[in-house]
Image (cartoon, rainbow, N blue to C red):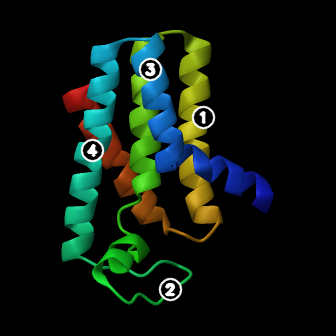
Amino acid sequence: MRKFMHVITQLGSPLFLIIITILAYLYIDKKAAANLFFAYAIALVVIVGIRSLYFKERPNKKKYHNIFQKLTYSSFPSAHAAKSVIMAYFFSITFPNIYIILLVWALAFLVSYSRIYLKYHFVIDVVVGALLGLAVSLILL
């Protein structure tokens, strides 16, 4: 189960999201892909702002040696949860098919759950990250 969760958590990684955004730009809609990228960027700016003002240890505590590590090692809020919700919302409005909608929201849930399962986040971190992703999506997408 742990290996599966490591694979699932990568669906919220920056590399995967860059690939999805490029594919959306090339094959779906250039303006929608630009809005998707902008939504990721706004969410990241908000998350970094929160993390710079409020540091919360992860369940598996890590020592940090500089400000960049401190921002990365802060648990609150979950960037993976925010990004996976943004991606799910984007695909829900781009492809309004019930099967696609169920699939992308199930994946967003799994990405968020994987962060808790792998002890990168507490439940509140994931919930707030997901709500942040939803708020950004509703405003920008």
Q: CA distance from mark 2 to mark 4?
A: 26 Å
Q: Closer to us: mark 3 or mark 2?
A: 3
Q: Toward which corner of the image does residue 98 lie, by quadrant?
A: top right
Crowd tier of the residue under label 1, counting other residues whose Cα lies within 10 Å: few below 14, some 14–19, many 20 or above: few
Against 79, is 29 above or below?
Answer: above
- Amino acid type at image mark 1: Ala
Residue highlighted by disc 3: 24
Q: Position of residue 44 (x, y in %)?
A: 29, 52
Q: Position of residue 77 (x, y in %)?
A: 35, 62
**Along the polypeptide, which appears first: circle 3 or circle 2?**
3
* Image quadrant in which the N terminus is located: bottom right
Callout 3: SS: helix
Crowd tier of the residue under label 3, counting other residues whose Cα lies within 10 Å: few below 14, some 14–19, many 20 or above: some
Residue depicted at x 27% and y 47%: 43
Q: CA distance from mark 1 to mark 3?
A: 20 Å
Q: Position of residue 124 (x, y in %)?
A: 41, 64
Q: Position of residue 127 (x, y in %)?
A: 41, 54
Position of 3 with respect to 33 (left or right) is right
**Along the polypeptide, which appears first: circle 3 or circle 4?**
3
Q: Is residue 75 visible?
A: no
Crowd tier of the residue under label 4, counting other residues whose Cα lies within 10 Å: few below 14, some 14–19, many 20 or above: some
**Along the polypeptide, which appears first: circle 4 or circle 1?**
4
Against 9, is 93 above or below?
Answer: above
Residue depicted at x 25% and y 35%: 38
Residue highlighted by disc 2: 62
Residue highlighted by disc 4: 41
Callout 2: SS: loop
Q: Closer to us: mark 1 or mark 2?
A: 2
- Amino acid type at image mark 4: Ala
* Image quadrant in which the C terminus is located: top left
Residue highlighted by disc 1: 106
